[in-house]
Image (cartoon, rainbow, N blue to C red):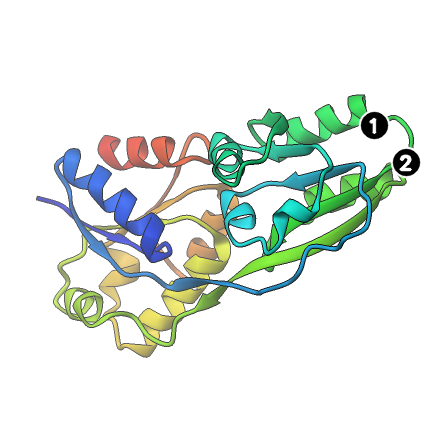
Amino acid sequence: MRRVLVTRAREDAERTAEELRRRGFAPLIAPVLEIAATGAPIPAERFDAVLATSARAIQFAEGLAASSAPFFVVGGKTAQALSARGAQVEASAPDVAALTLLLGARFAAPARFLYLAGHDRKDDLESFLRARGHVATVVETYEARAVAALGEEARAALAAGEIDAALHYSARSASIFLALADAAGAPATLRTRVTHFALSEDVARVLRAAGCANVRVAAAPDQASLLAALEAQ
């Protein structure tokens, strides 16, 4: 049975591990990030709309009920998180690119947006809003903090060469994982023998730059495609 290292934050990693077991793999959870609320308050001012691109941005939002503006979000999980908080979703898009198209059609004139986000994020949505003359107030509701070290089980498995594959979900987490593995004295086989599966080309670039010889990229930036790449290997 192939042993697969899962490096994402624990709550997400546990769901991934369950799916891996269902598919006949032996997962080893080794979170390199831990998610924490920032405690940033929601401004009481008026906004034309509230934006969110991740469920965590909603889950960790303090005083979310203070906003009565319509919500425009990315992803079904984000919409579900809003519903769990008793809020209504005006519109949900599959990705940020689709959300910008929706916002461009809905808000022709400059508008005021509240953007609930994580500390580490891409600039795509904010760049779009700036380019269209909109005003965006960003509230970072959570942050992903790097852990101090890999867990004991992961360190032992790496040292023994027992890991066959590793799943990587972001460029930042891939970079942190490699640094933590090096600090733990992981052997060179981590880069030469282990197959690294990247959620996107951005993630893959970090792995290749660090000398990983066997890197596979998911056909689409979602877990289903990542696991499909793993099964096809």
Residue that sits furthest to the top in the current view: 105
For the point 58% across and 35% down, which residue is it? 87
Tell me the kind of residue under disc 1: Phe
Residue placed at 75% from the left, 55% from the top? Answer: 43
Image quadrant containing the N terminus: top left
89 over 59 or under it: above or below: above
- Crowd class of label 1 (few under 14; some 14 to 19; many from 20; radius 10 Å): some
Q: Is residue 64 above or below residue 98?
A: below
The residue beneath circle 2 is 110
**What is the CA distance from the residue labelled 2 to the residue labelled 1?**
7 Å
- Residue under label 1: 107
Residue 122 appearing in the image? no
Is any part of residue 220 visible from this angle?
yes
Which SS class for mark 1?
A: loop
Figure disc tally: 2
Residue 77 appears at what percent x and percent y? 46, 35
